[in-house]
Amino acid sequence: GYGFMAEYMCPEMIARTGYGFMADIWTFGVFLFEILTCSTPFQHENGRDDPGHLKLFKNITTFKEIRFPRSARVPALAQQLVTALLVTDPSKRLGAQDELGDYHSIKGHPYFSDIDWDKLIEGMLVPTLRPSVCASEMKPVRRPFPWQAKE
């Protein structure tokens, strides 16, 4: 099966009509939505009832509007960016008219207005948040993670 990857599949992959780099732009939109809301935009309410991902794929290919959970409090500019990335027609997605690898229209979106792209590329951008972590706080986990449990 597709596992978690199914949630990141673009409409053209599902329809098997061929896809290109705009599939990556779609995936970026899904990923950004997930970071902002702690959920994915198209997941069926109960994924366990959708073993072949048919409901999920239908949600991806037939949605009319991206809906952000109110509880997530996603800023308007972030909503605009995600909405521009998650357009069903790949030729109309933000970045579709850019030269491959440039993504000028995405980098120029107002959501990213505070980013100095040249400094970022040069590795000279100073992070605005630097968590302070003491080595004593970094203790190894002694028990297995749930997915590592022995059967």
Image (tube, rainbow, N blue to C red):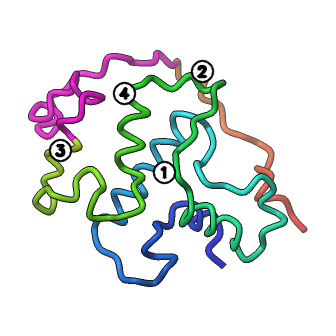
Residue at image x 30%, y 22%? 127
Q: What stretch is highlighted in magenta?
A: 107-133
- Mark nearest the camera among 2 and 1 is 1
> Type of residue at label 4?
Leu
Placement of 26 over or under 66, stated as above or below? below
Q: Earlier in the sequence, mark 2 or mark 4?
A: 4
Marks 2 and 1: CB-CB under 8 Å?
no
- How far apart are the alpha carbons under marks 4 and 1? 16 Å
Mark 4 lies on a secondary structure that is helix
For the N terminus, give its image quadrant. Answer: bottom right
- How far apart are the alpha carbons under marks 3 and 1? 18 Å
- Mark nearest the camera among 2 and 3 is 3
Front residue of 149/111: it is: 111
- How far apart are the alpha carbons under marks 2 and 4? 39 Å
What secondary structure do most residues of the magenta stretch adopt? loop
Label 3, on which residue? 105
Label 4, on which residue? 77
Residue 112 falls within the magenta-colored stretch: yes
